[in-house]
Amino acid sequence: MSKTGTEIEITRWIDQRKIGSYQIVVLCLCGLCAMLEGFDAQNVAFVAPVLVHHWRLSRPAFAPAFMAGLFGLLLGCLFIAPLADRYGRKIVMLGSVVAFAVFSFVTMASWSLTSLSVFRFLTGIGVGGGMANAIALTSEYFPERKRAAMTVTMFVGFPLGASLGAFLAAWLIPTYGWQSVFFAGGIIPIVLAVALAAALPESIRYLVVHKADPARITRILRRMQPASVFAAETRFVIAEEAKKGLPVGHLFREGRAFGTVLIWVVFFMSLLDIYLVVSWLPIVLNDAGLSISMAVVVLAVLQLSGVIVCIVIGPVLDRRGCFTILLPAYLLAAIGIAALGGSPTLALIMVSAAVAGIGIVCGQNTANALCAAYYPTYIRATGLGWALGIGRIGAIIGPGIGGIMLAMHLSRPTLFLFSAIPELIAFLALLALTRLDHARAAARPHAPASMSPAQ
């Protein structure tokens, strides 16, 4: 049993201790939130091939349904996620899950493309704030030496939710109809919301930055490390302080402006390509001769391959930093996406999807960890929310670009070749960000690099 001093710097306290079961609980709950958001982001793609036939729509005409939900997510990321820097991570995440449940049930009543688009937009607003705060909360509960790996591990919940959702949809739709996908999407988050309310703590760093009741902080620390004993007069501090003013303005101060812009470029291009590919892949493959169920399974393989590799790369992130993964990931994504267009057999389509998925999922998940490392606690949710929000602009544009290319009747190889270009642009932005990170480290020779180890 150890007794602490009268003043504790919370970041150092976490860094000096082993990871405990309570932190794993935080990781799992945040990962389950990410799973729901992954399922929500993809479920329209699961039902699109059915509704195109049911409502007698052309393929490009379905683009508004894809874009509406993403536009809602954009607004949620830009305006809901930053509320957590003022009111706390937990309340925003809980509200996100409840909104997911409510609007999933409402979406079952869709009777036209317009009504479906409206319901998807409302769902997106509610869900948008949860993703950024799941990332922020996870990064704030783990020590520096494991922070990037744990953040990436948590966020595999997003592609895992999309992948498992694809398998679930492939089983549900033929038997119970397309509405069953949204019914499942309403039941599951209700259970999760109860678990979050009961077991998810507020961010420990948020509480310290906002000078919360020391007794509340002490209770959380004792759950993290039961052997620790705290004196009644213990004060908790953090090596940063909340700054006054509009939080988004701080993203461009203290030398962060160029890095913020480059991070936005990476998120914009990455999410543009993710939603371009996953939104239209089932329809394109269905038109190429695959059954709807098999086309959805290919999409699941794309997501699941990335999940598996993300779990494996954790030790590399801990030792070598985010850039070691990010740069090859975006090149691999470009290669896999381009190969999807030229694969003549189902086996090669599966292999190409797996390669693309490894690059896409590992790239975006590691970019999340990089972004969380770049911003201090008092603007972390804002930084992540705006990066994901700018990414959502790309995500909105992506399905629209796919619709335009389909309307132009481009061949499958040409369509996927063009779809690989955003990954290459993200790669170039990361090269510039790498140089910026090296320059910042050189300017502060006695301080650790801000992003290389994703601190």
Image: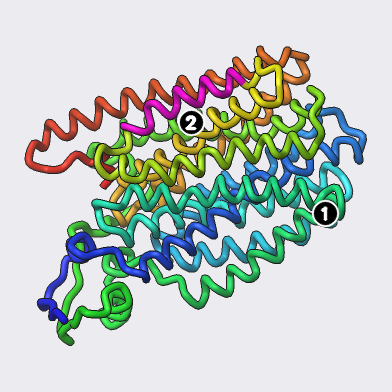
Between 241 and 152, the residue placed more toward the observer is 152
* Residue 396: x %, y % from top left: 62, 35
Q: Residues within 10 Å of mark 2 (few under 14, many from 20)?
A: many
* Residue 349: x %, y % from top left: 66, 25
Q: CA distance from mark 1 to mark 2?
A: 32 Å
Label the magenta part by its dominant secondary structure. helix
Membership of 328 in magenta stretch: yes
* Residue 131: x %, y % from top left: 51, 52
* Amino acid type of the residue that numbered disc 2 sits on in the rendered structure: Gly
* Residue 127: x %, y % from top left: 59, 55
**Element under disc 2:** helix
- Residue 261 makes an appearance in the image: no
Between 437 and 151, the residue placed more toward the observer is 151
Between 311 and 338, the residue placed more toward the observer is 311
Judging by the rendered image, the residue that carries numbered circle 2 is 359
Q: Which residue is at the far front?
A: 347
Q: Residues within 10 Å of mark 1 (few under 14, many from 20)?
A: some
Q: Quadrant of residue 344?
A: top right
Select label 1 or label 2 by which is in front. 2
* Amino acid type of the residue that numbered disc 1 sits on in the rendered structure: Gln
- Relative to residue 289, is residue 126 drawn left or right? left
**Which residue does the image show at 65% across and 34% down from the upper left?**
278
**Which residue does the image show at 90% across and 36% down from the upper left?**
53
Q: Which residues are magenta?
A: 324-339
Q: Quadrant of residue 285?
A: top right
Q: How is the image coloured?
A: rainbow
**Which residue does the image show at 50% across and 28% down from the upper left?**
269
Judging by the rendered image, the residue that carries numbered circle 1 is 179
Q: Is residue 158 above or below residue 359?
A: below
**Which residue does the image show at 73% across and 60% down from the upper left?**
184
Q: Is residue 340 above or below residue 24?
A: above
Give residue 441's mark: none
